[in-house]
């Protein structure tokens, strides 16, 4: 599935990483970017441990504005979900900003599940097994 990205969406995802240590770890981001095919867009240097996570997310998401980004978006949502970004103690402003950004791009963000749904949502594998 193709998810059109823009600077607003990049900034909305990046805000989950603002502040010392916020958001998933650098190693999680490295695995996510590599798995989604964006290792070339990731400016992270393991030796200097720079730039910070927020700058990495901004750089990769800006590169993704010109390439297919479904795996990147899905991976980032999964990483944020596992980190508790959408849980009981979530920062409601960050979630609201992300919701607004993706809505402006024509997506739907399920707040309870933090799943992005485009015009044609992916099939639910669980429902297929139950048949």
Image (cartoon, helix red, strand yellow):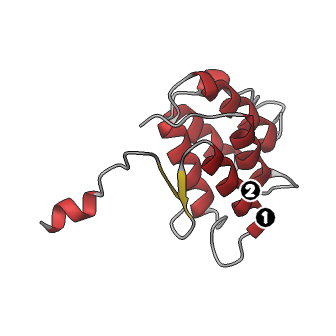
Residue 1 pos. (x, y %): 41, 37
Residue 45 appearing in the image: yes
Residue that lies at the very extreme toward the bottom in this rendered image: 88
Q: Which residue corresponds to the image point at 65% horizontal and 57% vertical from the top-left? A: 99
What crowding class fits label 1: few (fewer than 14 Cα within 10 Å), some (14-19), or many (20 or more)? few
Image quadrant in which you'd find residue 109: bottom right
Residue 24 appearing in the image: no
List the residue tagged with mark 1: 93
Q: Which residue corresponds to the image point at 67% horizontal and 64% vertical from the top-left? A: 85
Q: Are marks 2 and 1 in contact (CB under 8 Å)?
A: yes
List the residue tagged with mark 2: 97
* Mark sitting on residue 43: none
What crowding class fits label 2: few (fewer than 14 Cα within 10 Å), some (14-19), or many (20 or more)? some
Q: Which residue corresponds to the image point at 81% horizontal and 55% vertical from the top-left? A: 21
Q: Nearer the viewer, residue 13 or 120?
A: 120
Q: Nearer the viewer, residue 45 or 68?
A: 68
Q: Which residue corresponds to the image point at 68% horizontal and 48% vertical from the top-left? A: 101
């Amino acid at each position: 599935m193709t998810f059109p990205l823009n600077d607003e969406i990049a900034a909305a995802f990046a805000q989950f990483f603002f502040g010392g240590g916020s958001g998933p770890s650098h190693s999680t981001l490295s695995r996510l970017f590599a798995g989604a095919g964006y290792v070339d867009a990731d400016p992270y240097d393991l030796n200097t441990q720079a730039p910070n996570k927020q700058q990495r997310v901004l750089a990769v998401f800006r590169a993704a504005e010109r390439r297919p980004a479904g795996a990147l978006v899905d991976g980032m949502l999964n990483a944020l979900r596992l980190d508790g970004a959408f849980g009981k103690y979530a920062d409601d402003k960050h979630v609201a900003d992300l919701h607004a950004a993706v809505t402006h791009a024509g997506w739907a963000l399920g707040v309870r599940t933090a799943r992005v749904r485009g015009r044609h949502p992916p099939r639910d594998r669980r429902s297929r097994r139950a048949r």
